[in-house]
Each structure stands twice: as C-alpha cells, then as structure tokens.
Image (cartoon, helix red, strand yellow):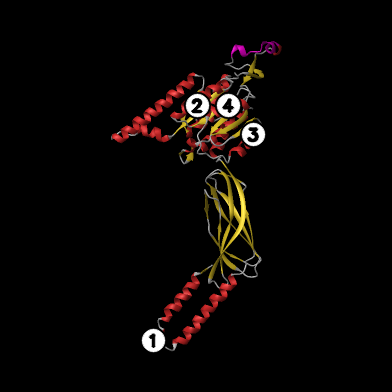
C-alpha cells in the first residue's frame, strides 16, 4: 500500500500552514485540530483498505491467435463489496506481445459487473500464458492505494501469420499464382494420368485422339490427362542455430515455416501426401498424410517450434529419414549452410537421392548481397568484399556439385522461398520425375 495523491496534498497543506504558527498563536489550536483530523482520516482509511476485497474476475481471449494479428481481450469484473471503489486495471499479458489501451481506470459499482477490453497482439509464435491481473484499488476516502493481484491463467496458442499465406492460397484457388512469381505451364490436357474423354479442341496433339470413341460418336474425341497424384512430399526443416538469423524482422525459420505451409496447401490440393521432419535441436517426425485436415494437423505440430543453438547434423538426419520413409518421395531440405557444413551435406544428400528426389533450399543472408553491391572506398570495404566473394564462390561450387549429382539446388533469400518451392514442385509434377 502507498499514500495517494490526495493524502500527499493534505500532508503538504499541513506542513505549509505550520510555517504560520510562529506568527499567529491563535492559529495553533485550529492547526492541531486539522492535523488530528487528517491523521485520524489517514489511519481510519488505512485500516479500511486493509480488508480483503471480494472481486470476481474472468478473462475472455481467443485460444488460438496468429502472430502479429490484433485481437480483443475482454476483462469482466464483479464487485461483491457493499460499496463502490475506484481501480486501475493492468493485465499481465505474455512477454513478446503488445497491448494497447492498458492500464484502464474504472469505478467498480457494488454488486454490478464491469466489462472492459484492450487490443492484444502477439509478436512471436508458440505457447503463451496470461498469468493474472493487477488491481490498484483506491481507498474509501481516497487517501491510500492498495495493489491486489488476482491469479487467473489463460493459455493460448500463437500460430504463424497467415495473412500472406491466405493471399497465396487465394491466388492458387483463383489460378492467379503468377502474381507471386509462380508459373504454371498451359499444357492443354497433357499429363501423366488419364483423367477423362472430351471433344477434340484446336491444339490437341494427334496422340490424344481416342479413335474408338471417335468412330462411335462420329466426331473427334480427345483423351485428357492430369498430373500424377497420390505422391508424397516430405520437408526436412533445419531448426538449428543458422536458422536464427533474421531478415525483414523475421527469422529464417519463421519464413521457412510459411513457405512450408504454402507448399503443403498446394500439394494437398494436388491430392499428394505431406509430411515433415525437423532437426538441429528440435526433433519431430510427422509421416506423410493426405486429406483436408492435413494442414491443420501440421499447424498444430509446428506452431511452437523455435530455433535452437544446436548445429544441424545432416548425416544423422538422412539416416533417420531413410529408416522411416521407405516409399519414394520428394524431399525438400530447407537449411542455411556454412562452408564447414558442405562435406556432411554432400554425403547426406547423396544418401537421400538414391531413393528419393531431393530439393535443397539453401537460404542466405541479405547482408551478403548488400555487401557485394556496396562501393569499395577503403581497405576495410575491400576486405569485406573479397571475403564475401570468396565465401559465395565456395557456396556456389558446392551447389554446382550437388546439381551434377541430380539434386535440385536453390540458393536464395528467405523471402524468395515460397514462390521458388511451389514453382519447382509444379515443374516436378509436370515432368513425372517422381
């Protein structure tokens, strides 16, 4: 407890008026009476506020929220006392989040419910907890403040931000993926699996003509094909220390997760099964599954994944995957390599490609590209340029080696990852490499 502003003002007035006492003996009696009254009020009000305040409290918050999205948090109070009192309300919202419209000043009326709300915006994925709420209560005569903590835990799940992914999926539904750099070839019914018969259209090849149906209906009938379905896509997601790097205020891991969710959605719409394995300090295995619920299940598995400080062990990861995944699949390895990783990476990828078709998506930091385009003005900038150039050249040679081994290699910035993965997936589907 602490004295309020009103109490401090009364004490200040008593102190200032005491300065007049040496000049007015008749004022002494009045001053003593005033001092006794103020002291009595302070003591009486102090004992009043020491009582236990009976307050019911309930917080209403969504159990699942997307990172960065503003959501309303509702606070309900019921004053069980037989008098009104003023309070200042502050909710203990989780760390790594923003809260606007707090604290709240209010008067809790006796036997009445008071409802207020504030804007809450989580800034990080994972599990979060509201621990409780602080009430700073003003005493009956307004001379003391009392702090009361009400324990009220509410746990929520914070999922990746789907605003961009929703935009991608909307474009995919509307066949406008080219807006985000995803190219779809117009193949006029050509594919790998037979789909249906239809009337001949200008541009159809002669090999598409179904002659038996043509003779039966006395008009040209073409066979229409579609891309192969019921294939399997597995993500190998590095969660190690190199994926902690952040570009555009988002870590490489967060951007990789968004790209993974986008391609999972596209692959599910193609009736392919999708699964993933994480490594680099976070070990999770989700076997390939298909169906409308696949994305929701993947989301519940990955929303709380955070990058670790461990190093990625590519060889051990490849051995684990080969033991778990017997059927041929498209393996998409998303990582951020350094020169010291290249030998282990080569061995791991060579193991995988014996059974699976492999894509290596190797993320690089934007600072590397910016360094190359900076003007060289002194010895320090020249040294940085030479160091980065040598590093990128070694990285390029490693990717070229893997490409010659039949691995699809992508050397790219994290924001480029979503479109690049979907483009390569669609190309592989069209080529029947799986």
User: Which residue in the protein does label 1 denote?
Assistant: 23
Between the C-alphas of marks 3 and 2, the distance is: 29 Å
User: Which residue in the protein does label 2 denote?
Assistant: 345
Residues drawn in magenta: 205-215
Between the C-alphas of marks 2 and 4, the distance is: 12 Å
Q: In the current view of this chain or complex, which residue is farthest to the left?
A: 378
Check if mark 3's residue and mark 2's residue have beta carbons within 8 Å.
no
Name the image quarter holding residue 260.
top right
The mark lying in front, picked from 4 and 3, is 4
The mark lying in front, picked from 2 and 1, is 2
Q: Is residue 406 left or right of residue 291?
A: left
Q: Nearer the viewer, residue 221 or 31?
A: 31
Q: Residue at x 67, y 10 (%)?
A: 211
Quarter of the picture containing the N terminus is: bottom right
Look at the numbered disc 2 and give the secondary structure of its residue.
Answer: helix
User: Which residue in the protein does label 4 denote?
Assistant: 319
How many neighbours does mark 2 have within 10 angstroms: few (below 14), some (14-19), or many (20 or more)?
many
Vertical arrangement, residue 5 with respect to residue 367, above or below: below
The mark lying in front, picked from 3 and 2, is 2
Q: Earlier in the sequence, mark 2 or mark 4?
A: 4
User: Which residue in the protein does label 3 denote?
Assistant: 294
Q: Residue at x 45, y 78 (%)?
A: 14
Q: Residue at x 40, y 28 (%)?
A: 392
């Amino acid at each position: 407890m602490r004295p309020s502003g009103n109490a401090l003002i009364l004490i200040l007035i008593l102190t200032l008026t005491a300065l007049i006492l040496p000049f007015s003996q008749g004022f002494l009696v009045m001053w003593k009476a005033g001092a006794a009254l103020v002291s009595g009020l302070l003591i009486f009000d102090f004992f009043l506020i020491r009582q236990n305040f009976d307050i019911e409290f309930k917080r209403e918050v969504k159990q699942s929220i997307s990172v960065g999205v503003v959501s309303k948090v509702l606070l309900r109070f019921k004053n069980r006392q037989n008098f009104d009192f003023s309070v200042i309300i502050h909710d203990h919202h989780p760390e790594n989040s923003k809260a606007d419209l707090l604290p709240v000043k209010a008067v809790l009326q006796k036997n009445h419910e008071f409802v207020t709300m504030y804007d809450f915006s989580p800034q990080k994925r994972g599990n979060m907890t509201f621990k409780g709420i602080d009430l700073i209560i003003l005493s009956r005569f307004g001379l003391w403040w009392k702090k009361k903590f009400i324990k009220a835990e509410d746990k929520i799940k914070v999922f990746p931000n789907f605003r961009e992914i929703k935009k991608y999926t909307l474009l995919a539904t509307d066949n406008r993926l080219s807006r985000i750099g995803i190219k779809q070839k117009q193949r006029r019914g050509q594919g790998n699996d037979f789909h249906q018969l239809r009337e001949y259209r200008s541009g159809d090849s002669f090999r598409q003509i179904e002659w038996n149906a043509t003779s039966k209906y006395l008009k040209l009938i073409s066979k229409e094909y579609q891309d192969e379905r019921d294939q399997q896509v597995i993500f190998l997601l590095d969660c190690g220390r190199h994926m902690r790097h952040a570009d555009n205020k988002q870590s490489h891991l967060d951007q990789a997760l968004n790209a993974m969710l986008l391609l999972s959605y596209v692959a599910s719409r193609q009736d392919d099964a999708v699964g993933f394995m994480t490594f680099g300090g976070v070990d999770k295995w989700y076997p390939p599954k298909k169906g409308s619920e696949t994305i929701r299940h993947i989301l519940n598995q990955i929303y709380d994944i955070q990058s670790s400080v461990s190093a990625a062990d590519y060889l051990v990861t490849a051995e684990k995957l080969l033991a778990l995944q017997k059927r041929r699949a498209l393996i998409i390895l998303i990582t951020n390599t350094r020169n010291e990783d290249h030998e282990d990476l080569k061995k791991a990828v060579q193991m995988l490609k014996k059974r699976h078709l492999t894509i290596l998506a190797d993320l690089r930091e934007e600072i590397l590209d910016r360094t190359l385009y900076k003007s060289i003005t002194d010895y320090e900038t020249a040294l940085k340029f030479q160091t980065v150039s040598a590093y990128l050249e070694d990285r390029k040679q490693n990717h070229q080696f893997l490409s010659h081994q039949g691995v699809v290699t992508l050397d790219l910035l994290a924001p480029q990852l979503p479109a690049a993965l979907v483009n390569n997936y669609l190309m592989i589907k069209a080529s029947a490499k799986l």
